[in-house]
Amino acid sequence: MDYFFNPKGLAVVGATANPKKGGNIIIANLLKGYTGRIYPVNPRYDTIEGLTCYPSLRAVPDPVDLAVVFVGAEMVPQVIRDCAVRGIPGAMIESAGFAEIGAEGVALQQETARIAGEGGVRLWGPNCMGLVDVKNRRVFSTVTSSIWEQGMIPGKVALIVQSGMLAGAFLIDVMSHGVMGMGKACSIGNKMDVAECDLLEYLLADPDTGVIGLYLESIVDGPRFISLCKAANKPIVVLKGGKSDEGAAAAVSHTASMAGDGAVVSGAFRQAGVVEADDFYQMMDYCRVLEAFDDLPSGLGNRVAIMTYSGGAGIVSADFLVDSQLAMATLSRESLTRLEDVFPSWMAPGNPVDLWPGILLNGTHKAYNETLAVLMADPGVDAVFAHCFVGGFDLEPQLDIMAGLSHSARKPLFCWISGERNAVSRFQRQALDLKIPAFREVKRAVDCLGKLLAYHRRRHQPVDDRIQDIQIQTVPLDRLSGGPRVLDERASKSILKRAGIPVVEEIRVMSPAEADKAADRFGWPVVLKGVVPGAVHKTEAGLVVMNIHGRETLHREFEGMALRVGQRGGMLLQPQLPAGLELIVGLIRDPQFGPCVMCGLGGILTEALNDRAFAVAPLSHGDALALIGRLKSQQLLDGFRGATALDRDALADVLVRLGALGVAYPAVREVDINPFIVVEGRPVAVDAAVML
Amino acid sequence: MDYFFNPKGLAVVGATANPKKGGNIIIANLLKGYTGRIYPVNPRYDTIEGLTCYPSLRAVPDPVDLAVVFVGAEMVPQVIRDCAVRGIPGAMIESAGFAEIGAEGVALQQETARIAGEGGVRLWGPNCMGLVDVKNRRVFSTVTSSIWEQGMIPGKVALIVQSGMLAGAFLIDVMSHGVMGMGKACSIGNKMDVAECDLLEYLLADPDTGVIGLYLESIVDGPRFISLCKAANKPIVVLKGGKSDEGAAAAVSHTASMAGDGAVVSGAFRQAGVVEADDFYQMMDYCRVLEAFDDLPSGLGNRVAIMTYSGGAGIVSADFLVDSQLAMATLSRESLTRLEDVFPSWMAPGNPVDLWPGILLNGTHKAYNETLAVLMADPGVDAVFAHCFVGGFDLEPQLDIMAGLSHSARKPLFCWISGERNAVSRFQRQALDLKIPAFREVKRAVDCLGKLLAYHRRRHQPVDDRIQDIQIQTVPLDRLSGGPRVLDERASKSILKRAGIPVVEEIRVMSPAEADKAADRFGWPVVLKGVVPGAVHKTEAGLVVMNIHGRETLHREFEGMALRVGQRGGMLLQPQLPAGLELIVGLIRDPQFGPCVMCGLGGILTEALNDRAFAVAPLSHGDALALIGRLKSQQLLDGFRGATALDRDALADVLVRLGALGVAYPAVREVDINPFIVVEGRPVAVDAAVML
């Protein structure tokens, strides 16, 4: 892949002398920073911008290992043929007119891919903005050349962006506002060949890259993506477009890509340690914050001290902490004593520290610097959130000194900055240089601080992701052949039981006498169920009778059930389990990630809470525990109103086994275990359906 | 109150010639805009800034109806005495050193208030920034005079801000960034006399004010505040500091104010039609959006069309709609046909409209203007969200033409703007002049659009807030006398029953024989309860035995219960109600809002959902229905898995009656009805406790 980023010679196919056209902008951008040889290709010119122009790729002298292509879509296949002939390993196709325009474009894209595959040429694009490498000043892109005037602030954040225009817009916006430095920005368009995983792998190994942000509408190879992220030693931030149903509809109509279900995607990301963003600005925020504090020590918690020139802003900041998994720090007695030097005697400092009285007494600089020094030294403080105002009131703090205090304490300092527009902009730029994240909104700052600290806590306490080797060889394979269908409860549970998942006892009963015998064996009360092939909503169909307390009732219910079941099926008798927390556990096959395991709250809580989480199979025991830990209703799991707490290891074991079943048996399309009732802490499958 | 805003003559007590001091800044600010007479007061000067300076207020000639006071706190009482002697009706005390500095300051504040009360002087402040009236160019404030260089953009948004520094910081920030115009900004500080309600009432009647934004840490008179908001014909946006427990702790330590419980405050705001914000920027956003579209027609729904230069941004925008109670518009067949003129033939336009192919074909202006014209004319579109980029790519749209299309269609147009910093700033300023809200973040824009449309839907469908006159005269008053205590279940339910709230039948039983008789009357199964004074957690104390199916069991349980109850109490027999949705309903007394009614989900759902809502009593039937409508679990209320739907009118009637009980009987401190079980759609109180 290095020829895309660091080509020894670069041909621009479709170069032109018309400064309004992309084919000229590419040349202009190259001339401003790229130091290798540039070969414009266009039969209509002898020179372009002082460079010799060649009639075709075949005529270009060596070395060339990247062709940037900006010609009409219909001409692209021939260009790729020429690349193959010349042995050019990479082509970056920035032309549009492929899969995004419908059937005709899809065919053209497929033909191009085929030619490239046969000729050993790797393709980037089409329908993309190519590459902007700020640090190395390489702009292989039609991006408007005003990008050079907007700062080109180098940094260690790399971006992979599926949408072409967005990539360009991002860059101009982010760099001109001076809030973030940038490394390599890759616009990957239709992903005909080179896709997010290829670039992610490259950037994970790239020493110039510290953090990777991705905007994706689809993920070409979900399992590879997840395994790259799991193994990554750099933060990865993803904004996934097309998450809601509305969004997914838009994704389908916009690209040929498949938008995954939001819950599955989020679950997969969490499992892989990916930081998920939900807006463009949030993606940028998370990236710059993770870049600024890339080596926080282990043991850093979530306790925040707030210092503010406005008591009101301190209160509002405190209100936000909990939502971002942060807590108010309790200052030590020593800190409080030291703060007495900064503040008037009538003031009893606390957290938030209201700086105003100290500013009036000792001036802005002393109040800010000494307070921050005290807070950074306090072992009960993990991070400081400082409110700053510039452009009036003599309130401008000495940010360089404050940054020094933060970095030497190895604790994050975040700033909320407001004030006069130009002064704010200067402050933001200074903060960027000093690696102090500054935000114009309190909530945004608190959210980012929470994400940063959570990322590092997780980094220092990684999930055990060793996958156990689980043998599920006893599943009767013959049952899994044949066309798509829903197995009945008995057959479904027999598969689960063989996979090592606890299921409720049951006995098939053919007569009232057999039912009596079974009930005597289980003990009363019992449950009688009708088993009818294809019947999914059993309760609604009258196929479940619970809480049968005696023989008389049992016989009556047996007769009724026999009528409902008819010739189609049989009956099962089960012991009635005591009331307990109801879970739902399941397996689905996601088009992007393959088999995924779900765990959620069941019974009446299903509709009320919609509390569920997904993880991609195979799951390690640690993955499974983390999956359980992502449910919102932790309180219920830990033993509701005196109930025994859920045995998390027992449930995790089930989730691991369900995932292993999905991996081992591709014929198993879907599994639903519902309800999965927790009895004395351990879950038992009371009903289940396996879909083939 | 008009003398605070429109004084005929204004004295500045504590004026000084030192340009670094607040007493000089006030004079300088007055000279830049105030056209009435200005009287500096300070015995140490003859003139200040060319104005005659007077040794004391008593020496100042008429007319003076406002004294702006900026002297040491200890001198303030004498100044107020002078005001009283001179008959000056209003004093705006900007000095600090009162309640915010502890006990000594509290005493000084009380003395000052007493003097003012006796002398008929109204006080604004202390510890505040006073008033900035942008439209009338009146700055009665120590705010840094750079405020004059930052634009002073007049608008119809008025602000009431409790925190002093924040008010000043807001103004500089908002005005210099050019995203919002401003009317009167009032910094009210410690609210010794003039408080939010006084100013709110004034501003509601002020023709220059279109929208009122408030930042409050406490509400002095909750019921008055709510009734002003309910009757308001202008949007009111409130940011309440001190909502979380963390925040509340900060509020107490920062001011002498009492921070209310977040749920109560939010409930009261919703009931009163107040738009609640949770960050400073969000308060400003909601204000400017509500100002921009102040007369949307009735019948406007929530269907949004998105037009974007980037398919990716369209997808992300669509993802946000649902969270903001918005929906994707379905374009009419006619719209789709008309759009064919703008786009290439291969493109099938849909929502989001991806403008890029149209821009390439027809240029930016035609693509934006014609698409917007089609969307605004579509009867299935209620609002348009347009993505704009400036500073490159020839993408700058003609915002004036687009604004015209929006305003003549009377449908909101919102913009997401990104691009080069200075171009973005120019765009934002132009958007402000054209009354088109522009945002730099997609999510923020969508959130604001959702709030705007929801506000207008509510405005056109007001809640019926006529309060019924409910007589609860049969509550035995003698039972409510005596000290604070918890009434037992029987006494509690008897009060509720007399208030017209349905309670489960019950019979006091003294012997097994009486229990049998009662059970026969109710029908089996039955519930046996022990009634012990002061026992709140009855289940845990073994005082509730449910599901008793026969005499034998009943007798056994009776004997056991008799042992547990002992001499302290008695026993009740109740019919066992069928399983149903469990609610919790209650009454509390909030320190700010007085009696408030709560309605929430009960049983296992209590801890899992924390789904509850509050409203201030007395409630109208419409208030009560709206309160029920605010619960998150509407699905459960509407009939879970075939259960009968809740009779909302029946529950609303209970809530109205509970509120009326709270209003009529101040001795009733708290009521808990838990569980309140829904049987065939109608709620029945199964257990209850009244706290006196």
Image (cartoon, coloured by chain):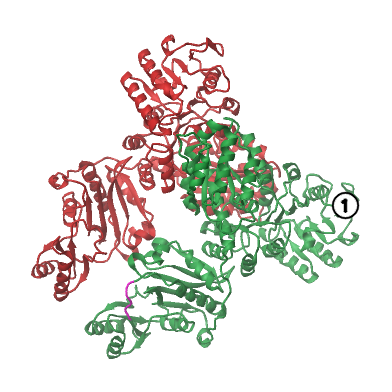
Chain colours: A red, B green
Type of amino acid at the residue the image marks with label 1: Arg
Q: Is residue A342 visible?
A: yes
Q: Is residue B236 above or below residue A138?
A: below
Q: Is residue B546 above or below residue A220?
A: below
User: Chain under label 1?
Assistant: B
Q: Is residue B114 above or below residue B128?
A: below
Residue placed under numbered mark 1 in the picture: B44
Give the image location of residue A579, x and y in percent: 27, 66
Residue at left offset 55%, top offset 44% = B374
Q: Main secondary structure of the magenta part?
A: loop
For mark 1, does the 10 Å Cα neighbourhood hold few (<14), some (14 to 19), or many (20 or more) residues?
few
Point out the stretch of residues depicted in magenta.
B575-579
Q: In this orientation, which residue lies closer to the viewer: B450 or A149? A: B450
Looking at the rendered image, the quarter that the N terminus of chain B falls into is: bottom right
Is B609 part of what is drawn in magenta?
A: no
Residue at left offset 59%, top offset 28% = A151
Q: Is residue A374 visible?
A: no
Which quadrant holds residue A77?
top left
Q: How many numbered callouts?
A: 1
Give the image location of residue B682, x and y in percent: 40, 75
Side of A147 relative to B583 (left or right): right
Side of A543 relative to B233 (left or right): left
Side of A321 relative to A495 (left or right): right
Q: Is residue A221 above or below residue A8?
A: below
Q: In this orientation, which residue lies closer to the viewer: B570 or A522? A: A522
Give the image location of residue B114, x and y in percent: 75, 69
Is B576 part of what is drawn in magenta?
A: yes
Circle 1 SS class: loop
Give the image location of residue A454, x and y in percent: 43, 44
